[in-house]
Image (cartoon, rainbow, N blue to C red):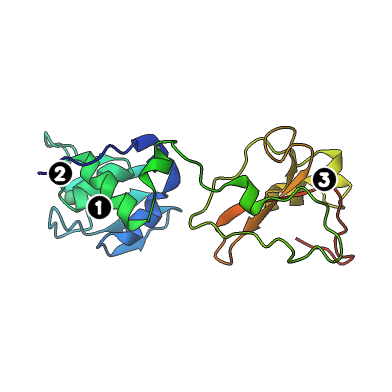
Amino acid sequence: MSKLPFVPFDPLKERVNIIDVMNALPLEMVAQKRPGEWRGKCPACQSADKSLVVTDGKGYTCYSRRGQAMEAQGDVIQLVRHVLDLNEPLEAAHWIVDAFHLDIDELRGKKTVTKPSTVLTKKPIEEGSRGANPPIVAQRGMRPLEHLEPEHEAVTALGLIPDDARRIGVGYAPRGVMKGTVAWPVRLSDGTLIGYIGLSAAILPSNWRY
Ligand SMILES: [Zn+2]
């Protein structure tokens, strides 16, 4: 077997949802009454019953090997390894990287998802400025900024209550590249976050609703 390049597991696990991975695998899973729980036949174990259970936010268990020395349960990487009957977790990690078009260098922290300069502007929104500097669409989504403050008075000043701001992902940035602005997420039509626009002043539509 050729030596596969290293993929850090923790950042990979943060980037993918186990249900999305489950759906990408050759499985026929059925949603259970318990929210987030799915059940189906395990192609690796070729079990007659629906022995494979995947739980959103937790992991998987394959009950056809329950009690055996080879315990079949674990995280999203172990799920792929089990279902596809792969030898190494690293092979499973690479399968996920390929299936979700992830960038190994990005997972290793060697580069950031989007260059702020390509998608961010600190200029207030004014008439005539629209379209002057169109954002360059990133190929992949970025992770939401975690330090934004939805309760900040600069957010309220836009006419946005903190609850709505939180739901949209809007907040005042006390530091970082968006420092001193209200950071407003920019998303593709499929919901992928590609950057932020920094607002220092804006007027929301009078009939504003989230
Ligand atoms: Zn199994």
Q: Nearer the viewer, mark 1 or mark 3?
A: 3
What's the amino acid at mark 3? Val
Is the shortest distance between ligand 1 and the CB of mark 1 under 8 Å? yes
Is the shortest distance between ligand 1 and the CB of mark 2 under 8 Å? yes
Alpha carbons under labels 2 and 3: distance apart: 53 Å
Question: Compared with residue 156, is residue 48 higher up or lower down, i.e. above or below?
Answer: below
What's the amino acid at mark 1? Leu
Measured from the top left, where is residue 187 in percent x and y?
61, 59
The residue labelled by disc 1 is: 52
What is the tally of numbered marks visible in this picture? 3
The residue labelled by disc 3 is: 155
Nearer-the-camera pick, 57 or 129 = 129
Nearer-the-camera pick, 126 or 140 = 126
Of the two numbered discs 2 and 1 on the same chain, state the one appearing first in sequence. Answer: 1
Q: Residue, x 42% and y 57% (percent of image)?
A: 33
The residue labelled by disc 2 is: 65
Is the shortest distance between ligand 1 and the CB of mark 3 under 8 Å? no
Alpha carbons under labels 1 and 3: distance apart: 46 Å
What's the amino acid at mark 2? Arg
